[in-house]
Amino acid sequence: MSGERPRLSAFICNYNHGQFVSKAIEAILGQSCPPDEFYISDDGSTDRSVEVIERYASKGAFTRFIRHQSNQGMFPTVLELRGMCTGDYVFGCSADDYPLPGFFEKAMGMAARYPQAGLITGKMVMQDARGRRLFTLKASRWKTARYVSPKDYLKEYLEVETPGHSLGSATIYRRDAIRDVGEFRAELGPLCDTFTARAVGLRWGIIYLPDELEAVTLLPGSMSNSVLKDREIFLGYIRAMARVARSPEFLPYFPPDYVDRWEAQYSALARFVHRPVIRFIMRHSMRCLTFRPIAKFATVSEKIFRIFFERVAKNA
């Protein structure tokens, strides 16, 4: 594959996101390096999603449109779509997120140069339901496009960022790499992509692009936000991810001391953010970020929260 443009598969999972899905479709179709195949699945929507999707399907925009008559859930839908993909690399997103211009071209160019990397990732732009920019998530140590070895991925990313840091939405996976780590594991709930990215990175290394690659819409009803409301459920997912990382399958890649620290720190953060006062502050801080004058200071706020949370975690 080295030196040649790899084949890319892309897919969208939609469920009752009729107000967002056309933006996601247009963003993929409008890439300067379009995917070699493009699938979209509607998981039993009850809004006008199917009407919107079928307008594109009638023009041959997709390789295939999969329509579920009833809701199957996120994990079965994602596994179904990944099973259809035949490209060397796979990109998937929910209908309320979308890739930014140039993402696929930059990613596939780097993939051709560094075929050993298990994934390509970069910055995520977080926005509200109206498309207003809130803040940006990124890897704090990396300023240039580069291949990151498994050793450096551990030292310069996993041991530097907060325990829950994830750029999963702005990620393209090498298809055989994600298959070999077991795809996305339903038992890990909202941490499934957090684990998968770490498992791939610690085994094959990653490519990092210091560019804004994906727009991610923060919605109150998302799976992650719903789970975060229950401390014990979220702590259960943290323990589950630690168990998988310690399993014989992944022990060669996840250093035990790292897994121990990660579990302790993330559990401490989870207990901390579930305190009523902290939850109130965080909820209203996010609302404040939707006002344009305050949104300009979102990056500063992110750094303040990072320092604050790191101190809490280190005292775990």
Image (cartoon, grey):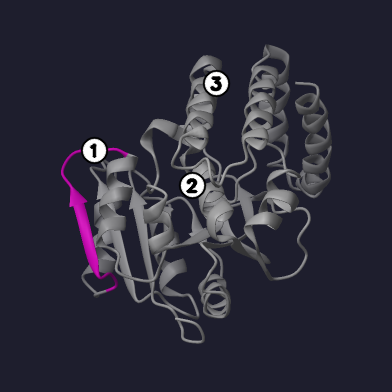
Q: Nearer the viewer, mark 1 or mark 3?
A: 3
The residue at which mark 2 appears reads as 196
Q: Residues within 10 Å of mark 3 (few under 14, many from 20)?
A: many
- Which percent across, then down, holds residue 138? 70, 54
The residue drawn where x is 25% and y is 61% is 84
Q: Quadrant of residue 271?
A: top right
- Which percent across, then down, holds residue 97? 49, 53
Left or right of 34 on screen, residue 281: right
The residue drawn where x is 51% and y is 62% is 118
- Which percent across, then down, holds residue 299? 79, 48
Mark 3: amino acid: Leu
Badge 1 element: loop
The residue at which mark 3 appears reads as 235
Name which of mark 1 and mark 2 comes first in the sequence.
Answer: 1
Q: Is residue 68 magenta?
A: yes
Badge 3 element: helix
- Which percent across, then down, holds residue 89? 42, 68
- Residue 125 vs 58, above or below: the answer is above
The residue at which mark 1 appears reads as 71
Left or right of 64 on screen, residue 237: right
Out of 79 and 102, give the one closest to the viewer.
Answer: 79
Quadrant for the N terminus in the image: bottom left
Q: Quadrant of residue 85?
A: bottom left
Badge 2 element: helix
Can residue 91 be seen from the camera position used here? no
What distance separates the C-alpha of mark 1 from that of mark 2? 25 Å
- Range shown magenta: 61-73
Q: Residues within 10 Å of mark 1 (few under 14, many from 20)?
A: some
Q: Is residue 65 magenta?
A: yes
Name which of mark 2 and mark 3 comes first in the sequence.
Answer: 2
